[in-house]
Image (cartoon, coloured by chain):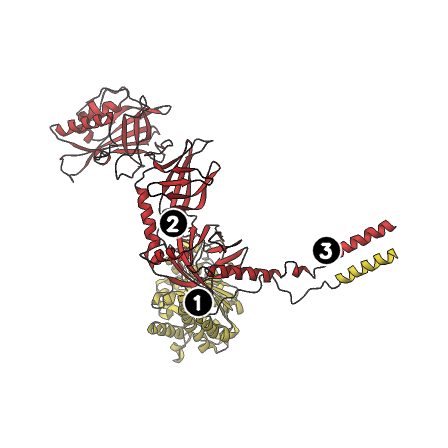
Amino acid sequence: MKRTGLLVALLVTMAACSKDTLNPNSLLVGMGGDTWERTELDDWLYQEFVEPYNIDVKYKWDPYEVNQRYNYTPVKEEKVKELMAAIKKVWIEPYEKLGGPEIIKKMSPKRYVLVGSFEYTESTQTNGTAEGTNKITLFNVNGFDVKNSDQIRGRMKTVHHEYGHTLSANMLYPDEWKTICSESYSGQWSSLGDGEAQAAGFVSQYARANPEEDWAETLSTILVYGRGWFDARVALAGTDGGEKLRKKEAIVLSYFKTNWGIDLYETYSGGKNGLMDTVQEAIEQLMEEN
Amino acid sequence: MKKSLLFLTSVALLAGAAGCKEDDKYLFGATPDERIQEQLEKYQSDLCAAPCGWLVTVGTQDRGEAGGAYRFWMKFAPGNKVTMLGDVNETTAAVAKESSYRLKQMQYPTLMFDTYTYIHLPDDPGMAIPDATVGAGLLSDSDVSLSGDIGGSEFRAVGRKRQCPFIFTRATPDDTAAIFSQLALTARKDTAAKRWEATKYPTINVDGFYIQMTVGRRLATFTYVDDATREASTVFAPVFAEMDANIRLVEPFRYRNLEFDRIVWDGKDYRVAFAGGSEYVVFDYQAPFYSLPFGPNKTYNAITVDKSKLNVTGGSTLSGPFLAVYDAMYNTAASASTSLFIRSLTFIFEMNERYEEQLRLQVAYATTGTAGAATVIAEASFRVNRRGDALYFTGYTQLNGNMDKVGPLIASSLLKFLLHSGDAETGVGTSKVSITPSGNEFTAGWVQNKTPGLTSPVGGLYLTSDPQRTTFIPGTLTFQ
């Protein structure tokens, strides 16, 4: 009888254990996301970026979004709409106009993280970073002034630069790109002067960092500073540097036409606006509006 | 067999009980996520439940010109909005700024000011505050880790990134009125700072052990002699003036098992009250109590004697027997046919190219007694010889032509006083200088600064044979 009782107790215990299965409805610690009372700014960002493009604009400070090694500040709330409206006008709308209404929906980073200060590394001040094709972090948002044309171009260059990475991650540029300046790429790019970079066939100092940054820099400077600026750079680069810049320009034009059906310079051949002209127009409109 | 069965059954029952997790969810009555959320809501509710807001002080890790304690007034509202004033500058003290905040679970529940506001200024890597470091700011914090109960009149917290200390004090209606009138956050600090300026070497005597302090607007230093090394140690401490002009340390200062966090103004004196009841009045020691770090490659290597600055009526830093030497030198030079008016003497201790220590004497003089007349420098050098702490000078050498004029006029006063032995007649150019050595030996030390308005550190050379230091060559100390 005693044995029977013990066995029953054992069976009951084992039966209780059989219920110990994963509960799909259980709450995971810290996975609920951050919440706060929605403001007009949150509503505006939702309407302009989340609803049409599923792009989340994260402007509230979150230390997990940045490199813990460096020091940052959050954004000034009043700068968020000013910057994001400019981004929509100078980045999204020109691409939609030339590449069709689906291009940004299909292919864009899904998260913009805004940070108030620059990212000060040991030797540089970083304007922006791209993590894969998903996340773009823009720094120095607090320094953005929509009334200052240099600031607009500088900041929009960062946006187009980071989008250049998104495009090349979806469709890589031709291998030939890496061979044009293969001897001149350097991890010490920040200590090499701009004049030297120009003579070596680069649009900027940073373009010397590696072929990927060269690609993004070349594309973004053409779009934001225009064909006139690029022609002047070629003229000042000397014979060798000028030839290399022209080769890169030709690859960028061909890449856009072949892969995305977008002309950059169509004004010059067909009388219509290309992507570069459309971006230039958008910048000028933005300056007039403000 | 029965024992084995019992044992097996017991093990199985225990294992079964330990393996069952069905009830873990309810161990504390809620899931961890629910409990975290509940705590965050409680903290937010407590922060909002201060009708006059909070006075919040943070101590930066930066110990430079702009580092120390920064103080803010904050009023939290339930809709994630916070209104803030700060003592960073006149604008932040007068113009309230609204921004947002939220409570987030990180390693600890964390209060985040998640859009830019005044508390980010000391933390801004872009030099938002002059004298901050590019890339680092003032090494402050703006995410605040909370723990324990924050429902009382005051609580302490710690910065998330750098562990900067925070004090949150519930503001009273009087505080609020003061804060909103006439830049009270900065004005109060100025008042307190002025009281400290009048005391040159604030010191407390803790039962025979001295602690010397400097108290600035944001940062204090506490200097004491280490028992083991006999060296002076200095601790930097962020401080702020409370609304009643008392000085408060953001973190307590600990000394020989005692600690204090306030220096209290009693209407006449500042007093340091250690925890436990002992009170010590802050008095002016007039000179540091530790040895003077003086010589080549030390904190100071030059002494400048300027009678017009050291010997002000009502004070007498330049006094005693050396004053007679100085006056004799001045009068002889001024009454000479060439009429040289000596303005200052500077004694500079340095290494020459052969790594021998030398004293370079600069005599600054003008050729007319008129204020504003051009100053000319005559230079000579001596070899520095050391015997223990004592030093003496030999090997007088004129270094420039001006000393040809000045040397003979000061030979029987200053040069005699300085020269220990030998080289009775030396020099360059046409005028040989005849000097009768005094045999004096000197020791470097601090001098009591008795000159009103003189804030520079004052030290000099006293006669080693006169430990009471009545014969002193005093001057302001610099490093050249």
Q: Position of residue A131 (x, y in %)?
A: 51, 63
Q: Residue at x 87, y 56 (%)?
A: A3
Q: Position of residue A62 (x, y in %)?
A: 49, 61
Give the labeled residue for mark 1. A159
Q: Position of residue A55 (x, y in %)?
A: 50, 70
Residue type, numbered disc 2: Glu
Give the labeled residue for mark 3. B18
Q: Nearer the viewer, residue A42 or A55?
A: A42
Rounded to the nearest angstrom, the CA distance separating label 2 from label 3 is: 55 Å
Upstream in sequence: badge 2 or badge 3: 3
Residue most extreme to the bottom: A271
Q: Quadrant of residue B23?
A: bottom right
Q: Residue at x 50, y 72 (%)?
A: A50
Residue most extreme to the left: B337
Residue type, numbered disc 1: Val
Secondary structure at badge 1 equals: helix
| Chain letter of the residue carrying label 2 | B
Tell if the residue under mark 1 belongs to the same chain as the one under mark 3. Answer: no
Would residue A270 be visible to someone looking at this image? yes
Q: Which mark is residue B242?
A: 2
Provide the letter of the chain coloured yellow: A
Mark 1 or 2, closer to the camera = 2
Asked whether the beta carbons under mark 2 and mark 3 sit within 8 Å of each other, the answer is: no
Q: Position of residue B267 (x, y in %)?
A: 33, 43
Q: Nearer the viewer, residue B422 or B119?
A: B119
| Chain letter of the residue carrying label 3 | B
Viewed as shown, does residue A212 lie left or right of B371? right
Provide the letter of the chain coloured red: B
Q: Nearer the viewer, residue A238 or A128?
A: A128
Viewed as shown, does residue B33 lie left or right of B356? right
Rounded to the nearest angstrom, the CA distance separating label 1 from label 2 is: 48 Å
